[in-house]
Image: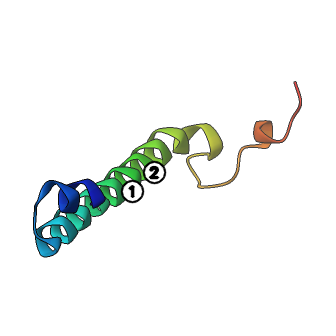
Amino acid sequence: MTRLIIGGASPVEAIQLQMVVMNMLIGASTMSSIISTYFCWPNFFTKAYQLETKVFSIE
């Protein structure tokens, strides 16, 4: 944002661009959390939605 202002852009445009970038970062982290949870779910829970006992074993 500072580079845009120093480069001659208006502060309102710099703030709008910064808000877009922050929303994209939040969206990317949210989507990666959802996707990783979706793929890891079968490793931690049984078909009856009970926690696997092998999660706590040291083997």
In the image, residue 43 sits, relative to residue 3, either above or below, namely above
Badge 1 local density, few (<14 within 10 Å), some, or many (20+)?
few
Position above or below: 32 against 11: above
Q: Position of residue 20 (x, y in %)?
A: 20, 62
Looking at the image, residue 1 sits to the left or right of residue 54; the answer is left
- In the foreground, 7 or 36: 7
Q: Which residue is mark 2?
A: 33
Along the viewing direction, whichever of 53 and 41 lies nearer the viewer: 41
Image quadrant containing the C terminus = top right
Q: Is residue 47 above or below residue 16?
A: above
- Amino acid marked by disc 1: Thr
Q: Image check: 41 left or right of 55?
A: left
Tag on residue 18? none
Q: Residue at x 44, y 46 (%)?
A: 38
Who's the residue at 16% across and 69% down the image? 16
- The numbered dot on residue 30 is 1
Element marked by disc 1: helix
Helix, strand, or loop for circle 2?
helix
| Residue 43 lies in quadrant | top right
User: Which residue, as the protein is rendered here, is positioned at the far right?
Assistant: 58
Measured in 3D between alpha carbons, the distance from the residue under mark 2 to the one under mark 1, in whole angstroms, is: 5 Å
Q: Residue at x 39, y 56 (%)?
A: 30
Q: Tell me residue 28's x, y (percent).
A: 33, 50
From the viewer's perspective, tell me whether residue 25 is left or right of residue 36.
Answer: left
Q: Residue at x 29, y 60 (%)?
A: 2
Residues packed near mark 2 inside 10 Å, few (<14), some (14 to 19) or many (20 plus): few
Q: Amino acid at mark 2?
A: Ser
> Furthest-bottom residue in view?
12
* Place of residue 35 in the rendered image (x, y in percent of width and height, measured from the top left): 40, 45
Mark 2–mark 1 CB contact (< 8 Å):
yes
Q: Choose top left, top right, bottom left or bottom right for residue 17.
A: bottom left
